[in-house]
């Protein structure tokens, strides 16, 4: 199918839809300068994912240290990033009263910053905005924890933050639990509430619009499948082919921002 024909077909599906679930991955945020994970220049071609298993973070100080050292490189682009044309196109879809929600694998918070209404964004893999103690559950803005690391504040040991909340039974009268950003690591359980809600929204959708996802990370990749199995149309916008392309009604290989905005322009024309 020719690119313009595919865009027009996708636009017609969007025009007819009333309950669109957008499912987004790292590819929608690369246009904001945030590296993706699985391309040749992605994060996991520079690091061994096994070093960042959640179980190793829990068990070993050296892996916690590696986690927080990597975070300096990983989170800097996120902190500087701004929502791009792709994020803003999904806000346009919400303003057209067609978007039910955005289900995102991303942790950068750019969908919310683009202007979506409260409750419209479901974060399957957590957020970099906050960090929590894995022992007592105390939560802080992640920026506060990074500042504590730089300042070597109480509770920071060899570049690793530990919870300094009072606990008479803890080491030196502190909780002492390891602190981690509220993102989902390899081997860590998906958040039950968000995962259940995402699948429920998919089952009720009349269109699932996939943007910038390789559709290989489980169980998140089954959300578009759930929507399709329940009768929804499936549109995939991604620079590279995905394992789900064969079941899609329309596949567009291209830029998220340009493709989405051209679709919406056709919807409005």
Image (spheres, rainbow, N blue to C red):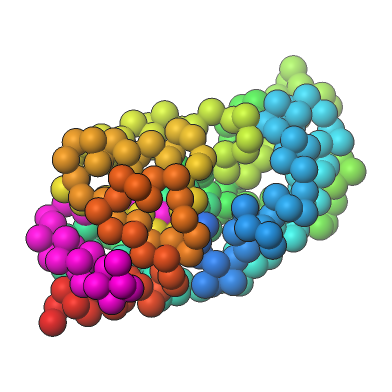
Percent position of residue 170, x then y: 76, 22
**Which residue is at 76% across, 29% downward?**
56
Q: How many marks?
A: 0
Q: Nearer the viewer, residue 236 or 52?
A: 236
x and y percent of residue 125 in the render?
50, 43
Eyeballing the image, is 261 above or below 167? below
Residue reaching furthest to the right: 158
Q: Report whether residue 111 is seen.
A: no
Residue at the (43%, 39%) spot, across then down: 220
Q: Is residue 258 left or right of residue 240?
A: left
Q: Would you identify the image quadrant in which residue 79 lies?
A: bottom right
**Residue 84 visible, this orientation:** yes
Task: Magenta stretch: give its range.
Answer: 1-25
For this view, does 150 lie left or right of residue 243? Answer: right
Q: Left of 193 or right of it: where is 18? A: left
Seen as rendered, the residue at the extreme bottom is 269
Q: Is residue 20 part of the magenta span, yes or no? A: yes
| Whether residue 226 is situated above or below residue 37 in the rendered picture | above
Is residue 253 positioned above or below 224 on the image?
below
Question: From the viewer's perspective, is residue 187 above or below residue 95?
Answer: above
| The magenta stretch spans residue 245 | no
Q: Quadrant of the N terminus?
A: bottom left
């Amino acid at each position: 199918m020719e690119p313009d024909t595919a865009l027009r077909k996708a636009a017609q599906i969007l025009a007819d839809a009333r309950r669109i679930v957008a499912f987004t991955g790292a590819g929608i945020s690369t246009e904001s300068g945030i590296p993706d994970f699985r391309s040749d220049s992605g994060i996991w071609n520079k690091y061994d994912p096994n070093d960042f298993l959640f179980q190793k973070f829990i068990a070993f100080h050296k892996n916690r240290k590696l986690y927080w050292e990597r975070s300096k490189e990983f989170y800097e682009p996120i902190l500087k990033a701004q929502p791009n044309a792709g994020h803003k196109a999904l806000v346009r879809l919400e303003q057209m009263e067609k978007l039910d929600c955005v289900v995102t694998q991303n942790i950068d918070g750019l969908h919310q910053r683009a202007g979506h209404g409260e409750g419209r964004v479901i974060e399957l893999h957590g957020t970099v905005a906050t960090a929590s103690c894995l022992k007592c559950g105390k939560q802080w803005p992640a920026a506060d924890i990074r500042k504590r690391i730089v300042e070597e504040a109480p509770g920071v040991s060899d570049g690793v933050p530990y919870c300094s909340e009072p606990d008479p039974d803890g080491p030196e009268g502190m909780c002492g639990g390891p602190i981690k950003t509220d993102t989902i690591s390899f081997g860590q359980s998906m958040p039950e509430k968000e995962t259940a809600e995402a699948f429920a929204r998919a089952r009720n959708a009349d269109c699932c619009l996939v943007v910038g996802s390789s559709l290989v990370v489980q169980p998140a990749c089954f959300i578009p499948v759930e929507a399709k199995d329940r009768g929804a149309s499936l549109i995939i916008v991604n620079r590279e082919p995905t394992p789900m392309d064969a079941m899609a009604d329309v596949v567009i290989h291209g830029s998220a921002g340009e493709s989405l905005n051209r679709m919406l322009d056709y919807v409005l024309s």
